[in-house]
Image (spheres, helix red, strand yellow):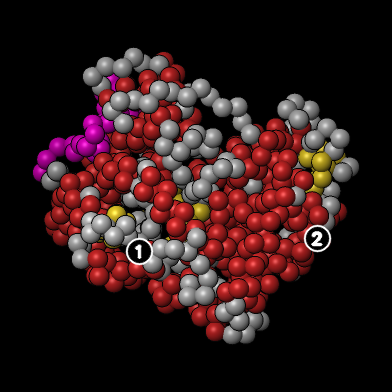
């Protein structure tokens, strides 16, 4: 552990990935004059170039674990997945998947070391003592999370996990087993039933390292001198409660303990944030508000106002409660200086947090948009669009002109990552703040709730797009371009057709593409290539709004049967001819599989 009187801390994970690939973490002369987020961006670019160079050189395995991970990724052909957190097409938990994960963690360990070194060694970095403490110790905690994350991944795979997933899908699991912070295991009494164990007990060895870093963080933070005394006290309360939550071994106290943490976190409005996660993989990736996106922030606030105007016209308790949450919500574009855990293989373009209904109702949500993830999504979408819309080489088409976003440079903005974040991802995440299906968990199956909640949020984004157009915040051409962006971005769902992780999004993509074909917005030409008819955009958006309001009406009536029926209708769209065509059209060639390493 590190004290302020000591030297550079080791931010690598406990498995040893922390090499600087020759000793150079960053180039100080090139960073002179850079401050705060700009400085961190520059450091990331330097470490990325060094790491990518090592991958390209296919360094041979030796005692350096970073170089070994680099060589493994190169051999597996998963270096791009590891460097850009794009695991689409990698069979889950396969040897290639693990190779990508290990390489991604090695790359992030290098980045964490560079960030901590820069804040320790470079003058004029722009962060005060409080912010430096928050960033540095978040990096230390993130390094400790690496072993915890791997243990978690290994605990939730295998025959028992498959058995539990099937039981959950059929509604056969007791509600009390859906605790967000426990591992479900087979009961020891021979009954064939299940019981649950708190994370603090099941992962005691791995969490001991995490808790030690939290103790270090608290000790240093208490001594930090700062003019931001209120923010310091807020973070102290938050970090102490976070540590208590991770250490809690009484399953009956877990939910309330984490609820208290949600409450403490929502009070913090500081630009440096650490999102909370519910019932997903361990993750500890810092977010820092990037104030260079002030224009986009103003646009998102306008979108939020338009959404509030719509929901004000609805009557009923869900609308009234949701409006308070929607009004109290915030959205911003954030920079992630380092990643760990779940973010290594599934980097969200946007997140709406916290998930807990009562906290959302009281405080709203914080929406974190990640420009880097949006860039990665756009690159993948353009590749798939070119493949699905051109038959692999010819120019794609819309009625009367070339396909926006395929090979026509003048219309490439159809897949512009920032536009996608602001006009599509942000309203999707804001949609989670109001009419959330968790409020109806007593009348709908848990599995259905998860599937329909993401679909409802996607429909909310499209409904908002229609509102923006009808209220003249967008021109018709802008609306059509964004709709094209929405549909082309969803091609990645068909590329990952069999993925259980992304199934909630796949359900939406299936429904949207089927309905788009039904109204004539999209079609297949004689060569099996996609053709867009933008004159049908308004008809599609009107059809989408009808479906969206059908779901809202069922929620107002607390009609679980109607919600289940709507979900079944959406899933039935997979029989549509265009939907049957897209998984093959969007499929990418599979790379050869690796033999399973004995150490895994």
Residue shown at 73% from the left, 69% from the top: 546
What's the magenta region? 4-29
Q: Residue at x 15, y 54 (%)?
A: 215
Marks 2, 1: nearer the viewer: 1
Q: Main secondary structure of the magenta part?
A: loop
Image position, residue 594 (x, y; %): 43, 23
Is 560 positioned to the left or the right of 122 in the image?
right
Above or below for 225 versus 488: below
**Which quadrant holds residue 27?**
top left
Give how far across and how far down residue 343 sits, in percent. Answer: 41, 45
Q: Quadrant of residue 110?
A: top left
| Residues packed near mark 1 inside 10 Å, few (<14), some (14 to 19) or many (20 plus) | some
Report if residue 17 lies within the magenta region.
yes
Residue 538: numbered disc: 2
User: Does residue 534 sit above or below 398 in this rendering?
Assistant: below
Q: Secondary structure at mark 2?
A: helix
User: Which residue corresponds to the image point at 26% horizontal and 41% vertical from the top-left?
Assistant: 147
- On screen, residue 169 versus residue 236, left or right, reads right
Q: Disc 2 or 1, which lies upstream in sequence? A: 1
The residue labelled by disc 1 is: 177
Q: Looking at the image, which residue is at 82% across and 38% down?
A: 397
In this orientation, which residue lies closer to the viewer: 235 or 459?
A: 459
**Mark 2: few/some/many CA within 10 Å (<14, 14-19, 20+):** some
Quadrant housing the N terminus: top left
Residue 450 is inside the magenta segment: no
Work out whether residue 590 or residue 224 is closer to the camera in this orientation and state it: 590
Label 2 – label 1 distance at C-alpha: 45 Å
> Looking at the picture, how far across and down is residue 285, in whole percent?
36, 48
Task: Depth check: give the residue in front, 419 or 17.
Answer: 17
Can you give x and y, in whole percent of width and height, for residue 136 in the image? 25, 46
* Image quadrant containing the C terminus: top left
């Amino acid at each position: 552990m590190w004290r302020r009187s000591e030297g550079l801390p080791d931010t690598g994970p406990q498995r040893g990935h922390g090499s600087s690939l020759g000793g150079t973490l960053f180039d100080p002369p090139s960073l002179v004059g850079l401050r705060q987020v700009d400085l961190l961006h520059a450091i990331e670019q330097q470490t990325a170039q060094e790491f990518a160079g090592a991958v390209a050189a296919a360094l041979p395995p030796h005692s350096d674990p970073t170089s070994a991970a680099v060589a493994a990724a190169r051999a597996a052909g998963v270096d791009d997945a590891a460097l850009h957190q794009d695991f689409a097409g990698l069979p889950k938990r396969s040897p290639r998947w693990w190779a990508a994960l290990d390489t991604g963690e090695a790359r992030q360990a290098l980045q964490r070391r560079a960030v901590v070194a820069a804040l320790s060694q470079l003058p004029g970095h722009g962060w005060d003592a409080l912010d430096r403490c928050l960033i540095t110790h978040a990096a230390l905690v993130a390094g400790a999370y690496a072993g915890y994350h791997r243990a978690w991944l290994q605990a939730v795979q295998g025959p028992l996990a498959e058995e539990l997933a099937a039981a959950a899908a059929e509604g056969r699991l007791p509600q009390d087993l859906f605790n967000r912070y426990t591992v479900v295991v087979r009961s020891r009494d021979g009954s064939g039933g299940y019981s649950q164990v708190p994370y603090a007990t099941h992962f005691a060895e791995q969490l001991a390292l995490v808790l030690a870093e939290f103790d270090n963080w608290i000790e240093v933070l208490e001594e930090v001198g700062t003019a931001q005394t209120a923010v310091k006290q807020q973070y102290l309360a938050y970090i102490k409660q976070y540590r208590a939550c991770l250490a809690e071994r009484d399953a009956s106290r877990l939910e309330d303990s984490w609820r208290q943490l949600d409450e403490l976190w929502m009070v913090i409005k500081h630009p440096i944030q650490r999102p909370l996660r519910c019932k997903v993989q361990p993750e500890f990736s810092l977010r820092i508000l990037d104030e260079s996106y002030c224009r986009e922030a103003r646009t998102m606030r306008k979108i939020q106002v338009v959404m509030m105007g719509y929901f004000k016209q609805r009557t009923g308790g869900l609308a009234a409660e949701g409006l308070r949450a929607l009004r109290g919500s915030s959205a911003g574009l954030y920079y992630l200086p380092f990643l760990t855990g779940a973010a290594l293989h599934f980097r969200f373009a946007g997140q709406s947090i916290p998930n807990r209904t009562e906290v959302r109702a009281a405080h709203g949500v914080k929406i974190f948009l990640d420009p880097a993830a949006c860039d990665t999504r756009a690159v993948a979408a353009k590749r798939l669009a070119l493949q699905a819309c051109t038959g692999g080489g010819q120019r794609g088409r819309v009625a009367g002109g070339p396909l926006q976003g395929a090979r026509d440079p003048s219309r490439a903005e159809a897949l512009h990552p920032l536009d996608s974040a602001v006009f599509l991802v942000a309203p999707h995440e804001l949609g989670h703040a109001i009419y959330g299906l968790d409020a109806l968990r007593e009348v709908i199956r848990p599995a259905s709730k998860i599937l329909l909640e993401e679909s409802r949020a996607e429909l909310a984004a499209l409904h908002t797009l229609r509102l923006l157009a009808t209220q003249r915040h967008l021109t018709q051409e802008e609306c059509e371009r964004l709709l094209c962006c929405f549909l082309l971005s969803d091609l990645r769902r068909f590329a990952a057709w069999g993925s259980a992780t992304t199934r909630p999004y796949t359900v939406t993509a299936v429904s949207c593409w089927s309905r788009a074909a039904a109204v004539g917005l999209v079609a297949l030409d004689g060569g099996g290539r996609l053709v867009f008819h933008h004159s049908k955009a308004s008809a599609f958006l009107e059809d989408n709004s009808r479906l969206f309001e059908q779901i809202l009406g069922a929620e107002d009536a607390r009609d679980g049967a109607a919600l289940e029926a709507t979900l079944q209708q959406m899933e039935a769209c997979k029989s549509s001819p265009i939907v049957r065509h897209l998984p093959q059209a969007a499929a990418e060639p599979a790379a050869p599989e690796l033999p399973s390493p004995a150490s895994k």
